[in-house]
Amino acid sequence: MTVKLSYRNKEYEVPAGMTVRDALKKIGLQPETTLAVQDGKLMTDDTILKEGMKIKLVAVISGGLRP
């Protein structure tokens, strides 16, 4: 029972039943700087991943104009 995560043209598999936050940590990404999206909808860190899910991971980019 696995879940597929894709991030920057790489694909990872993690066991179903873990949270998004735990899955991100397992593959070496920081939950504070990565968003999980399924079917165009943002997932929360405490969402439990279910078998067969396909999740797209997106890096959070910050910035802006300086005063």
Image: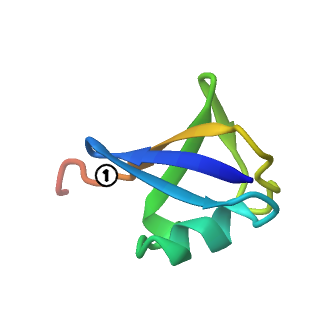
Q: Is residue 13 left or right of residue 17?
A: left
Could you tell me residue 18's position as x and y percent? Answer: 76, 66
In the current view of this chain or complex, which residue is farthest to the front? 1
Residue marked by disc 1? 61
**Is 57 in front, or is 67?**
57
SS category of the residue bearing label 1: loop
- Please identify the quarter of the rendering in which residue 9 is found: top left
Q: Is residue 62 left or right of residue 13?
A: left
Query: In this rendering, is residue 24 above or below 41?
Result: below
**Which residue is drawn at the image coordinates 79% and 62% (left, top)?**
46
Could you tell me residue 10's position as x and y percent? Answer: 30, 48
Q: Is residue 42 left or right of residue 65?
A: right
- Please identify the quarter of the rendering in which residue 20 is found: bottom right
**Is 42 in front, or is 25?**
25
- Numbered marks: total: 1
**Which residue is drawn at the image coordinates 46% and 58% (left, top)?**
34
**Which residue is drawn at the image coordinates 82% and 62% (left, top)?**
17
Could you tell me residue 37's position as x and y percent? Answer: 58, 37
Could you tell me residue 6's position as x and y percent? Answer: 42, 44
Q: Amino acid at mark 1?
A: Ile
**Which residue is drawn at the image coordinates 63% and 23% (left, top)?**
39
**Is 35 in front, or is 18?**
18
In the current view of this chain or complex, which residue is farthest to the top? 39
Quadrant of image for the C terminus: bottom left
